[in-house]
Image (spheres, rainbow, N blue to C red):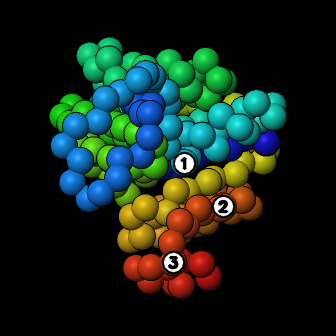
Amino acid sequence: MEVIGVGIAILDVVHEVAAYPEGRFCLCIRSLATRKCRGGNVANALVVCAQLGTRCRWLGVSTDPATDSEAAFVHSDLSAHGVDCSLASIEAGGSMPVRATGSRTIVHSRDLAELSYEAFVKQLALYRRNIQQDPNTPVWFHFEGRNLEATEQMMLHVRESMPGVSISVEIEALRNGWDSAMK
């Protein structure tokens, strides 16, 4: 089995604080400790699958790890956990998404475009032409349901071009017309 995760990988910056601030307007919170780790729903799911012995590949948008230390951290961490990053669509501009958490507060900053349908088709062709080791090996595509229109197009493209593969999608909240995509 080979799992291809389609979605984001991010850099989590975790700030530990003594207590969650009371009141609505807290101007200063002191961080007791800070650490960086890889995050993102698809990235985390791929790491778990890799730990269970499955060959895993990440297909998402990234900045160039050769020139962006945040992207290098994310790619290195995924690789260290057995997740192949060669299908990442490398963008020249932007920055890797950073999610900083302090207690229960999440600040998500994403200066990087979502994976487009066109970039997905290009990377899927690369996979089938240069990377896929055995066309008879079962393949499972797991999509992070972030951008409904593009994700639905990607899933339909996989169904048409690779009949017989398994497809799953993670949907955090049913909104934006997911009913049509679930058919």
Instruction: Give how far across and how far down residue 162 sits, in percent.
Output: 64, 57
Q: Residue at x 71, y 57 (%)?
A: 165
Per the model, the C-alpha gap separating discs 3 and 1 is 16 Å
Which of these two is toward me, 78 or 31?
A: 31
> Would you name the residue on which mark 1 appears?
41
Residue type, label 2? Ile
Residue at the spot 28% in from the left edge and 20% down from the top edge: 68
**Mark 2, residue position:** 167
Q: Quadrant for residue 143, please give it.
A: bottom right
Residue 46 location in percent, x, y? 64, 39
Q: Amino acid at mark 3?
A: Leu
- With 63 as the anchor, is 173 left or right in this view? right
Tell me which amino acid carries mark 1: Asn
Q: Earlier in the sequence, mark 3 or mark 1?
A: 1
Q: Residue at x 55, y 67 (%)?
A: 171
> Which residue is disc 3 drawn over?
174
